[in-house]
Structures are given as structure tokens and as C-alpha cells.
Amino acid sequence: MPVVEETPADHEALEPAESGDALRRREGVSRGLVRLARRLIRDAVHHCEHPEDADRTEDIHQIRVQCKRLRALLRLLKPVTDEKIIAEENTRVRDAARNLADFRDAFVAGETLKRVFDDAAPRRVRDAAVLLNVRPGGARHKGDLAAILENLARDLRRVQTTVRKLPFATRGWGALAPGLERSYRRARTSFQKCHKHQHKHFAETFHEWRKRVKDLAYQLEFLDNMDRGVLRRQRKECRRLGTLLGDDHDYVVFAEHVRDRERHYEHLATFQPVRKRLRRRLKELRAREFALAFPLFADEPEMWIAHLEGLWQKWKNPRRAEDELETPEVPLAVGAGVPELRAVTTPATGGKAISGKKRPSLPPAAKGQS
């Protein structure tokens, strides 16, 4: 049975300075999540049907971003609603957006080549581009793209119809906590795997980490009205890490393209500077990735979600939070680590106390994680 939440009218729900792209303090969680899904779909469909530029590069980028946000929202809902429906709609969005990958990759290949040779003479870039069969900006097949965008808009409208009818097994914080903890746990586990295999250059491992970090960043965006301090900084750090991991993925894919083309020009040394620069850039990039990730994923998932719940209760019930708050809050892991943590009790849900421990240099892998 769907849980019906009592919510005020829309004009009462929107408070001053609240973002419409995040949950609002006076609206029910299920109502807010459905509203956000419809908003994301509406924006993606708008870019499908109303071009912003001649080659549709910006439209393709915006559509892909909105589809990723939508999939992150569906994953957030998965533990508290019909998993089968969520899986089907997630697959529908993924497959629809995947048809734009070739158009995006053609553009990224040219941009990656320019980044690799950002301090080189333009002629050197052009010479390498000819041999690598790369055109900066990428080719566009307007007829194919128009058909893809038309089909994508149709599929997104189907998802919108389904999302409006989703049943929720719980309400309030209980509708958010399982999905958020799952996303944080998966991102943290992926980080540990990448750190363990950082010198083995496993492209798929880093690509998986990137997807998990992006999911977490998008889901934290949905809580943007809740906390303007530590939580927002953590979300921004997640986005920075996701951007670095995106560049990492572009470099790895481009390196594979270089190796494929190199087989056709074995007698030339033209690709040598490309490979050398790619290796150096990738090494520098991964050092920055891990420097960002260590403080972000220093907390155990249970501790991270317990503190998040405290922020939620304080936001939803500010007067009650002031009366009941007796112990100092444990800050989220952003920036410098905290040498020792005091015991805290999970707010509102009656969770068990978490005993204080010194933070390890690398968080131990959690047992039984998927």
C-alpha cells in the first residue's frame, strides 16, 4: 500500500532561499522525490526538443547529465519501493542515454587530445589528430541524432508516468536513509579497490568508482536545502572527485585509441610523445583523486548516515532539535581528519551508540558489501 504523506500546498512548501532542485523542508519526502524526478525529466526533454546550438553539443551534455541525476534518484528510491519497477525504469533511462555515447565520445576525443598537448604547437596537435583519426569537436550525424533524441524524449515521458505511481514502503527519513547509506558504502568500497590496484591501471575499476561517486554527489544535491555548511562542502568535494575521475576515464579511453591506431603506424615515432604525456597526466591525476578521497570516505557508513540523520532532524524540527541536543555533533569527514571521535547515539531511530576510534589512514573494507 502506498504511504500517503500529508503535505502543504506548493505555495506554502517553498520557503525563502530554498532551491527547487532539492527537497523542501515542509514537503513530504515521497512527494518531493517524485517532484524532483519530474523536474529532471522535463529538463532533459526540453533539451531533446529545443536545440541550444547548431551541433547540439551542449544539448547532448545536458541530457546526459539529467539522465545521470535521474538514475541516481531511482537508485535512491530502490530500497523503499518496488525494486522491479525501479530496475526496469533505470534500464530504460540508461539505454536511452547510451545512444548518445558515440556523439559524446567523438567530441571528447578531440578535447582530450588538446589537453594532452595543451602546451604544444598547434601543428603538432593537428598532425597527431590526423594519424589518430580524431576531429576536435567530433563528427555529427544530424539525421541519426534527431531520431535518437526523439526516441529518448518518448522513453523519458514513459518513466515520468511510472514514477508518479510509485508505492513507498515508508516515509520521512526512512525513505532516504537506506539509499543514501548504500550509495556511500558502494563509493567507499570502490575507492578502497582503486587504491589497492592504483598501479595496475584497471580502467573498469576506476570507471566504477566514478559512477558511484557521481551517484552520491547527485543524491547529496537533493539535500541541498538541508545543510549549507559541512554537507554542501562534502557534496562539492564529491563533484570535484567525480570530475577528476571523468578526466581519468577520458585519458584511459584515449590511450586505448592510441594503442589501436599505433598498430597501423609501427614505423613512426609520432605516438611516442602522446603516450608519454598520457602516462604523466594520468599519474598526476590519480594523486589528486586519492588526496580528495581519503577525507571524504574516512567515516564508516553507519557513522556517516547517523550524522546525516542528525542534520535531517535538526532541519525538519529545528525547535525540538534545540531542546534535545545534548551531545556535540560528529562532523562529516571533509578536509582535515578528526583525531578521535566521541561516542554518539543515532538520533531519532534509537540506534546503538558508536564507540570512538582513531581514524585509520585507509578505511578498512566493509564485510559483505556488494
Image: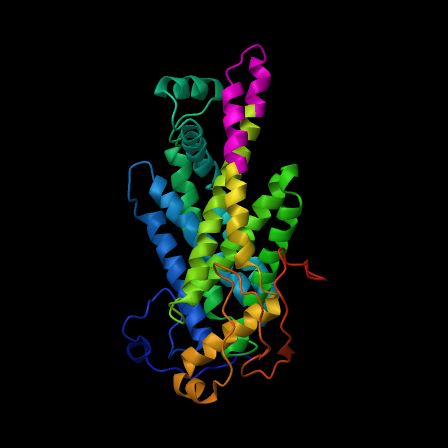
Closer to the camera in the image, 49 or 53: 53
Which quadrant: the N terminus? bottom right
Q: Along the horizontal axis of the image, is 353 left or right of 281?
A: right
Q: Is residue 247 above or below residue 323?
A: above
**Magenta stretch: helix, strand or loop mostly:** helix
Q: Is residue 355 above or below residue 200?
A: below
Closer to the camera in the image, 310 or 93: 310
Q: Is residue 366 above or below residue 209?
A: below
User: Residue at 56% across / 74% down in the picture?
Assistant: 306
User: Residue at 49% across / 59% down in the picture?
Assistant: 336
Residue 20: within the magenta?
no
Residue 155 visible: no
Which quadrant: the C terminus? bottom right
Closer to the camera in the image, 46 or 323: 323
Q: Residue furthest front?
A: 339
Q: Residue furthest top?
A: 267
- Total label count? 0
Image coordinates for residue 237, horizontal then vertical, percent: 45, 55
Closer to the camera in the image, 265 or 119: 119
Image coordinates for residue 256, horizontal then vertical, percent: 57, 29
Image coordinates for residue 152, horizontal then vertical, percent: 44, 49
Residue interval drawn in magenta = 259-283
Image coordinates for residue 134, horizontal then vertical, percent: 44, 25
User: Residue at 62% across / 56% down in the picture?
Assistant: 361
